[in-house]
């Protein structure tokens, strides 16, 4: 297939773009490089340096591309930031996605794979979370993605759009060549590894008074390569039958690690001390997010390969050691 990958220079998008290329698909990455790296894009993929809010450029890209599908990763991703600047998230994650969907209709591209999120669920009523559980985001980031899922339902029922909405829990880990490299970094595991590497003095724990076993937030960390496998399965499943598909799947390992457990795992993996400072809660953080991924396991045969938190952290640590300046040294 020929696939447009928005946000394909970013963390998850670049790993999926590489997996698509490896599987023999043809890839065009569309990214404004605001948070991505050209060096992360596989050399076999074409890069269009464009913004998804730029209707004219996106229109030209879709018109000339004859794409079989779009995988849409481009977005703002930090839940904490969304509680200070919600407008940025509704513009980039919601409004710009509508532009993309309108143009897909116009150019008759009928397969769409969407990067959705565990943040849709807010504070869950039960654990592990299933796809049919209530959607009640506690942050504007989650709401900006929920609005897209709502639009997708209407595009599916009215226009026959085939789509997969993949609700990732916390993406983590690295391949041998691709990893998470944000500036500044806000995600827990890379920050903990920066502290282990002596690149920052300490890690601040955002809240120690949650109703969890050790008082810190619990997340379900899922290896980025396992996410990539799910994307390929979903894309290849879409539009296979007469009926247009509508696939909604959680992607997680099904077990949670608290912030303190992640720090302990990073100490084991790196063998280095990590200084910790206890701080206040971060606005909008749900206390616990752990996935049931039974649905995608059963329906698409997905099965994660890296389920152990130490293994996931080890892969990120290995990349960091082989790329001491991140992608900075490759551009
Ligand atoms: N990282 C996670 O744990 C996680 C979990 C759930 C969902 N997601 C979703 O997965 C997707 C990818 O996340 P990531 O962690 O790889 O983030 P990332 O920031 O590394 O990648 C996003 C990419 O999109 C690009 N981008 C942003 N706005 C753009 C725009 N207007 N036009 C063109 N390009 C734009 C950035 O330059 C970047 O390369 C996002 O949609 C995110 O919401 C991420
Ligand atoms: O310096 C830090 C950074 C994070 N945390 C905590 O660690 C946990 C994980 O935080 P983070 O790595 O920032 O991820 P989340 O806020 O859980 O969000 C990620 O995971 C979501 C899915 O669960 C995605 O939708 C988001 O895009 C992605 O940023 C949270 O409890 C944070 O409060 C700290 O205590 N200290």
Image (cartoon, rainbow, N blue to C red):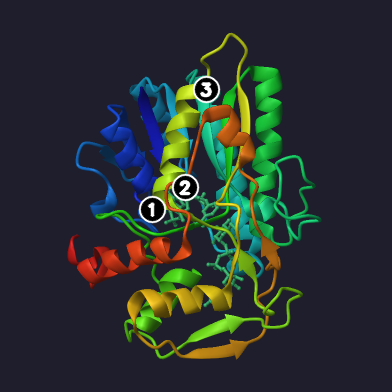
Q: Indicate whether 261 appears above or below 87.
A: below
The numbered disc on residue 329 is: none
Instruction: Look at the numbered discs 1 and 2 and tell me whether their residues touch, using CB distance below 8 Å.
Output: yes
Q: Nearer the viewer, mark 3 or mark 2?
A: 3
Residue drawn at x 58%, y 8% is 242
- The residues tagged by marks 1 and 2 sit, at their Cα atoms, a distance apart of 8 Å
First in sequence: mark 3 or mark 2?
2
Find numbered disc 1 in the image and state the secondary structure of the residue it sits on. loop
Q: Which residue is mark 3?
A: 238
Q: Which residue is mark 1?
A: 10
Q: Indicate whether 127 appears above or below 146.
A: below
Q: Is the CB of the residue bearing disc 1 within 8 angstroms of ligand 1?
A: yes
In percent of width and height, residue 303 lies at 49, 40
- Write down the quadrant of residue 29 in the picture: top left
Q: Indicate whether 283 appears above or below 202.
A: above
Residue drawn at x 45%, y 42% is 54
């Amino acid at each position: 297939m020929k696939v447009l990958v928005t946000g394909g220079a970013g963390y998850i998008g670049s790993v999926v773009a590489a997996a698509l290329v490896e599987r023999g698909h043809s890839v065009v990455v569309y990214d404004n490089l605001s948070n991505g790296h050209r060096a992360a894009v596989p050399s076999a993929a074409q890069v269009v340096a464009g913004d998804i809010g730029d209707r004219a450029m996106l229109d030209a890209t879709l018109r000339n591309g004859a794409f079989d599908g779009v995988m849409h990763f481009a977005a703002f991703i930090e839940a904490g930031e969304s509680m200070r600047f919600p407008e940025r998230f509704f513009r980039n994650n919601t409004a710009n996605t509508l532009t993309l969907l309108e143009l897909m209709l116009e150019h008759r591209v009928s397969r769409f794979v969407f990067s959705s999120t565990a943040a849709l669920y807010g504070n869950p009523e039960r654990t592990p979370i299933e796809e049919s559980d209530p959607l009640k985001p506690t942050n504007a980031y989650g709401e900006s993605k929920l609005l897209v899922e709502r639009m997708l339902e209407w595009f599916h029922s009215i226009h026959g759009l085939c789509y997969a909405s993949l609700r990732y829990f916390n993406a983590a880990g690295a391949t041998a060549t691709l990893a998470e490299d944000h500036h500044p970094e806000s995600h827990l595991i890379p920050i903990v590894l920066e502290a282990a590497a002596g690149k920052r003095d300490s890690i601040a724990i955002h809240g120690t008074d949650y109703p969890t076993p050790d008082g810190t937030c619990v997340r379900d960390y899922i290896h980025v390569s396992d996410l990539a496998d799910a994307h390929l399965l979903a894309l290849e499943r879409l539009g296979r039958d007469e009926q247009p598909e509508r696939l909604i799947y959680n992607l997680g390992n099904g077990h949670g690690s608290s912030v303190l457990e992640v720090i302990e795992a990073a100490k084991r993996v790196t063998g280095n001390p990590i200084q910790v400072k206890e701080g206040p809660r971060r606005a909008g953080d749900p206390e616990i997010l752990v996935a049931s991924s039974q649905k995608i396991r059963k329906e698409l045969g997905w099965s994660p390969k890296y389920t152990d938190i130490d293994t996931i952290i080890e892969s990120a640590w290995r990349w960091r050691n082989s790329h001491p300046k991140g992608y900075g040294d490759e551009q």
